[in-house]
Image (cartoon, rainbow, N blue to C red):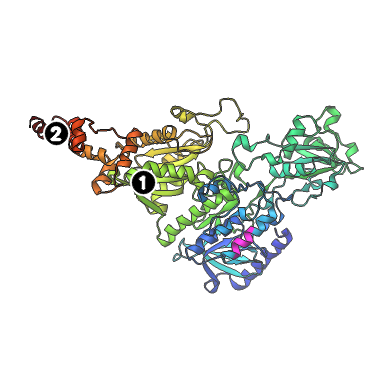
Amino acid sequence: MALPIAQRAWGLLLIFAFCVGSSCTDSTSTLPYHNYCIIGAGPSGLQMAYFLQRARRDYVVFERSHAPGSFFALYPRHRKLISINKRHTGKSNSEFNLRHDWNSLLSHDNRLLFRHYSRDFFPDADTMVRYLEDFASMLELRVQYNTTIIHVRLEKDSQTWNGHYFILTDYNSQNYRCSLLLVATGTWVPNEVNFPGSEYVEGYESVSINPDDFAGQTILILGRGNSAFETAENILGVTNFIHMVSRSRVRLSWATHYVGDLRAINNGLLDTYQLKSLDGLLEGDLEDLAIVKDKKGKLHITLKFYLQNSNSSASAESITLPQDELDNFATRAPYDRVIRCLGWKFDFSIYNRSLRLMPGKGTKKKYPLIKPSYESRGTRGLFVLGTASHSVDFRKSAGGFIHGFRYTTRAVHRMLEHRHHGIPWPSSIYPITQLTNAIIKRVNEASGLYQMFSVLGDIILLRENATTFEYLEEYPVGILAELELHTGRKTHNGLFVIIMEYGKNFSGADKDVFYYNRAVGEAQHAWQSNFLHPVIYYYKQLPTEREMRLCPPDWPLPRPDAIHHIVEDFLTDWTAPNAHILPLRRFLENCLDTDLRGFFAESCFLFALTRQKLPPFCQQGYMQMQGLVGNEKLRRHAIEAGLLEDYRVKHSTDELLGGERNSFDQLLKDHVTPDSPLHHLVNTKDEL
């Protein structure tokens, strides 16, 4: 819950008085100190606390309420979450199942999966509150409740991690000192629009949620997001009619593929609008509006310029209204109530100017201005997590929601582990023969790639001579040029980047995503895939920062040396041998100029006799005494499957002698080349 403005102002006055009396800098060395301070015990704050606790770091979480997740104690007002809770997928793979679990936080405890808390596909918000309470208590996270941070400032110190300390002051004038600040407060300050008559507007945060209070009334809703449609859905069956006005057209999530746009669960008003049942949608700039109230308490919508020549105290009856000049003006009917549902913005008020924490630009101005690494552009060591970090992928991916920021939070933690504790980004090293398998496994299972499409990517670093590779999971591709700095891994021999993408021209508010030939099924047309699908970028060298800056706005990465799209799949199951795996393997072989096929021991034996250079599979397997022990059953199965030729010579001599000697002789005849050292030996045997 937000503190009233008056209380916050009084708190700041207390801070000023305290600073005047004690100089604010004289005794900071004696303040309670932590390496990491997290503001906010919402989902992102708890998620970061979990990672810090597992790494045994010194941290504390400050929460203004008496329990975690205080935002969900009030919002959404009508208590129905729009984050899906798909409990059954037909698979037991826990990583895959997280693709369809939008509420769980990441942890090692399977009891803390949200499916154990609710059976509803769209759960109740009170269940989320209970879940977050259990997450904090069962994992014994260090959360300091009832601590409202009302001021944050910097104190310079060249001996610290980032050249300064963060000094946090709570409502009781208690100060705290931290080396690194993680802001996880979300966006909770309601967006408001000031115009003449805005005092008659009710806010989403306080309007009644009892449908009976709206019976027989005419309602105007300002806004066109999920909160606006959620409010309309609640009262749709009891009102005379509902009008909804906003600056932009309605954005349907199934068309934009952005989960923050209007979801189907709330779009009943679209039915009643298009099926002509009195309700309707209008477009207009809210700042141009004005509301006047008549003697009966009815609210009339007019335009601001109509009031410019009128007395501000004039009654509604004496003010010129648009319908006086245009008798079919759309909003000429008076309204009983006007409700504001314009979403929320970040609270910048508690941050001292020295932090230089600035709002973004344009549509991102409700979020702090941060880098793709989630660090403030103005202050080193200040990171923004969760919903407030959504400026990195606003209207592109899921970074503003639990199923997205649980992975971006983990990425931030991995960067901090390397920056301040010298622990490189986790990676695995495999022989090059496993390259195709490693990619196929990740694109079919990984939840972070799937949810944070075009934002998080898997990085494959090639070792010298491309005999092995190093696999890094879910790295922010927006800082690809700084990969070595943030991970501690070297990129001297080229790299692959695996991300998930929608088709370039498939998403948008005006797109018809249900047109007849919307899907691609042929591997040769994979680059035209529309639905979410894996894309592999190959770079001979790590892209530079300049190349990243010049990247086209609709491209997640700069132009690669080679690119491969794995064709979209109706089941999102990219395991088809011909459609998915074979084209991928051939792409990788072309990039590496090598043969990535797997071979039976018989084939490796023949290659050893007939070739100067063996395929990697034979070099790293057969020649190193690796592989399965062969037997007749395996050989017969390979022949029947067309993987091996049947070299056994079947005639009476073979039957009498067991067939072994002549079979081997025939095999040598068929495969020893004329210039081979064994050619003379074979001819000599024939003469004998």
Q: Position of residue 630 (x, y in %)?
A: 29, 44
507 horizontally vs 223: left or right: left
Where residue 334 appears, as percent x and y from the top left, is 86, 37
> Would you say 284 lies left or right of 24 here?
right
Q: Which residues are magenta?
A: 131-137
- Amino acid bearing label 1: Leu
The numbered dot on residue 461 is: 1
State the residue position of label 2.
676
Confirm whether residue 69 shows in the render. no
| In the image, residue 135 lies in the stretch drawn in magenta | yes
Query: Could you classify mark 1 by the number of other residues whose Cα lies within 10 Å: few (under 14), some (14-19), or many (20 or more)?
Result: many
Dot 1 or dot 2, earlier in sequence: 1
User: Residue drawn at (74%, 33%), measured in percent from left and top?
Assistant: 271
Residue 314 is drawn in which quadrant? Answer: top right
User: Where is 94 relative to 320, above or below?
Assistant: below
Q: Secondary structure at mark 1?
A: strand
Q: Residue at x 22, y 37 (%)?
A: 606
Kindly identify the amino acid type of the residue bearing the numbered disc 2: Ser
Quarter occupied by the N terminus: bottom right
**Residue 460 placed where, x, y %?**
38, 45
Q: Are marks 1 and 2 in contact (CB under 8 Å)?
A: no
Question: Of the residues tagged 1 and 2, which is closer to the observer?
Answer: 2
Cα distance in 3D space between marks 1 and 2: 38 Å
